[in-house]
Amino acid sequence: MPAIKEYQTVTSISGPLMLVEMVDEAKYGHIVDIEFGDGSIRHGQILQVENDKVLVQVFEGTRGIDVTNSTVRFLAKPLELAVSPDILGRVFNGLGEPKDDGPAIIPDKRMDINSKPINPYARNYPNEFIQTGISSIDGLNPLVRGQKLPIFSGAGLPHDQITAQIARQATILGEGKEEFAVVFAAMGITFEAAQFFIDDLHQTGAIERAVMFINLANDPAIERIATPRFALTAAEYLAYELDMHVLVILNDMTNYCEALREISAARKEVPGRRGYPGYLYTDLATIYERAGRIKGKKGSITMVPVLTMPEDDKTHPVPDLTGYITEGQIILSRPLHRKGISPPVDVLPSLSRLKDKGIGEGKTREDHADLYNQLYAAYARGKECQELATIMGEAALSEEDKKYMTFANKFEARYVSQDYYENRSIETTLDLGWELLSMFENAELKRIDVQLIEKYMPKFRKT
Amino acid sequence: MSETKQGRIVKVAGPVVVAEGMAGARMYDVVHVSKLNIIGEIVELHGDLASIQVYEETTGIGPGEPVVDTGAPLSVELGPGLIESIYDGIQRPLDLLVELEGERMSRGSALPGLNREKKWHFIPTVTNGTKVGPGDIIGEVQETMLVQHKIMVPIGVEGTLQRINEGDYTVVETIGVVVADDRTETELKLMQEWPVRNARQTIKRLAPNAILVTGQRVIDTFFPIAKGGTACVPGPFGAGKTVVQHQLAKWIDADIVVYVGCGERGNEMTDVLMEFPKLKDPRSGEPLMQRSVLIANTSNMPVAAREASVYTGITIAEYFRDMGYVVALMADSTSRWAEAMREISTRLEEMPAEEGYPAYLAARIAAFYERAGRVLCCGSPEREGALSIIGAVSPPGGDLSDSVVQATLHVVKVFWSLKGELAYKRHFPAIDWLTSYSFYKQYLKECFENKDQGLEMEELTTQAMSLLEQEAELLEIVRLVGAEALSPKDRLALETSRSIREDILHQNAFHKVDTYTSMDKQYEMLKTVLHFHKQALAAIETGVETAEIFKLPVREEIARAKYIPHEFVTKVAEIRDTIDEHIKQLHPSTV
């Protein structure tokens, strides 16, 4: 291990960046400690090295740093998280330091927070259905173990309640007790939102199986760049070394991206869309792609990132690039929320890409795939009729259109809407779907196999 | 070859490293960076300073570390062993890397693209003493049940063939020598190398003349792609680009499929890896993997290797084309490739053009697609090969004015426009029939042995397309004044269009029968739907109520025709008799 070197050669400070000169042997990506005259310490990471000039991003911000009295210590290692089984039940700050009143972690090992990419050949395809107890997810956009399924939300929408409900209710069907854990990373969210989640975990006792990394809205913004990586490092430790099934909740990725933009702007990089750096896609991928399963390992990482769409616009760079990396998305809708439908899941643009391998006979039920296809098709048509009715009045609709509109209304009120503490089994969800479809003639149910209709449609079942 | 040069690093900024002491190095030479031996490529030269794009993560690398120039451009190894392989962007076998280094990618791994130990049985097809030139086929190796790998004389080698023998060889053993006129000898091996950024040579380009059947109804029937053609699939996320690409890779009527997962999801590549060995080729019954080469550089893998991955893929594809095969290359997604270019360009501090993309973006995209085509291959025997490229594009927000989409549309001949709205209705493949186009439609009729059937198919597609266009207009009217205002004929047009959309254009990739539809069945299905239209129209003219017609039970049979297996394709034709019967019952005089 090379000796740790100290320098007092800070020459310029600008925004979150600091330039140190006359440095020997600095390495890209390594971390530094910055010590002030009064003995307080901040942390930084090397963004660029050119000859003896080193550009450092300071996680806690540069306020109060001066060029003469600061000592920069080059630690010759990348950012690391100290891990041991004791991290369960603990709360850390955004830089992975204990934030609760508990003792320091005595590490079993230290892990680089930028783990190496998983070889695609070593991945195991996610195909185990997770029952969340929420019909609009289980029935229509099923989550599977090892998937990354974000929630696209907006300011004022109840994404906190939904993530809490998923964390509370998620189970795998038909198996014995398996070790599970929840890793929660808060990036720039309010104290209230974070506390809501923590309180919920306390109530169910799940707090003992949870690890939290909390960077609140008033904590240093640049720190947020590291927070999700600390959380995922903890998750990887739990999943691949302690064989646990880990649910990772990252809330809120929009704040993360803004921190990244701040650094990029300070470096005077050529901006991409809306000022976000051109490498935002690659950067997000290094976070999201850490979800998954690995052949030969028992544990898994399932990821539910939350992001708020500015002005509910899903073409904004953050949701847009996220959608291109994640395996689907759950989109929340403000109109539904206004109608009092909760959770306000906007069913049509929501999607789970991994559903097809996670459902069906032996996983959920044989009729699942046909059923959701039909529900989608019928609801899409019903939605069109709803819109038509708002333009021209209900009277202008044909009988058939009216039927589809009734279906859409019922579907929203009974299928999508449910209490945040209602845990529906997958059978309940599927049967509810059949019940709603029973208002149509068989010939209209083009997406469903005739045999399945005869087997599952309530009116046939009774006879 | 120039002598090995060694320089030292002066700057590290993400995937770009600058080294000094590199005078004499050439653009696009491959270099080894630092003690870790990370591979990089020279992308800029200033005096003795060289900017290098590095194919791996650069954390922990700093000034002073060595850079060694190999003096050669980035090349791939071509020979038996390519098929069934899965490579990263610079042709490192991912399966072997797992065995060697575990489940995560470590840095500086050096594994050859082709297995050095495996012996292949080589059978010469020419005799000693034959005069051979570049591209001549001198023998064969049965690589898999589906692929007969032709061994060709490398470009630049000419002379008399000697000491060529049948036998079992590794890819690096000598299978024979070529003696040139000046008595210099060149050893021939099963393997040859080719620099990825250069297109492989051909005698001449030919115009496409045949359809590449994909088994996807909306594609084959309405927007077909030709053997040697180019297509692009743009669409917002969730519109089903990847499913379209996977479906094509599975069912396309090509001898060889090269699938490049460029900056996409890890789990999707895993899906391909796990599914292809299980799926059977509809023609031969052998696993599809036996004709496939996979290249996976997922989004979290190094960005520079992502930039290289499409070139690695196309070079391998060209190599098989040169054997006289029909090859299809799927690149998912070319936007990630363009973004990789942008990222490297930004780090080089180049002046950006639109949206931060480099000014050479359009030129690179055009040059890439121009490597497709039907060609007359080099060497004897005289043979034709074809290489089709199907590129997915992921424009931000699905906006087609995006630079990558526009640059691609300038060069491709088929455009499958994926629409988010269709995907939300779960209408898959979500190819928008009103905006998509294909320049290869005139070859559709050649897909049928019976010439009349081919001509009829052409008429049917034209009729169906005009109905769909009519539907778009009629829906506007309905939106304004309501469905009641339409005449019975217009109402029928709406119903038939709905039937075309739901029963023909919509296709379920995950249904065991519906996932692939033969050309004959596509013809029968379309003919049946339009036969219903014709008969219903006649009935309406004699005063039958539209409501009566729409209620006919035969309509359910039409809707379920897609689930009739190909072996029973006559059953689809029989539906037409049922149609006649049912209509007759409504109004005896119509039939």
Image (tube, coloured by chain):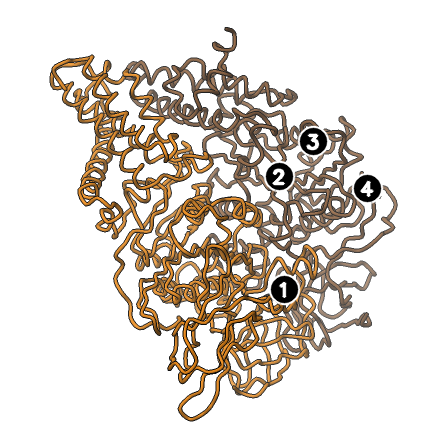
Chain colours: A brown, B orange
- First in residue order: circle 3 vs circle 2: 3
Q: Is residue A122 left or right of residue A375?
A: right
Name the mark nearer the viewer: 4 or 1: 1
Label 3 belongs to which residue?
A196
Distance between the alpha carbons at the discs numbered 3 and 1: 38 Å
Label 1 belongs to which residue?
B57
Q: Amino acid at mark 3?
A: Phe
> CB of mark 4 within 8 Å of CB of mark 2?
no
| Residue furthest bottom in the image | B182
Name the mark nearer the viewer: 3 or 1: 1
Name the mark nearer the viewer: 4 or 2: 2
Chain of the residue displaying label 3: A
At mark 3, the secondary structure is helix
Label 2 belongs to which residue?
A304
Q: Amino acid at mark 2?
A: Val
Q: Residue at x 45, y 14 (%)?
A: A438
Q: Amino acid at mark 1?
A: Glu
Name the mark nearer the viewer: 3 or 2: 2
Chain of the residue displaying label 2: A
Q: Quadrant of the N terminus of chain A?
A: bottom right
Distance between the alpha carbons at the discs numbered 1 and 2: 26 Å
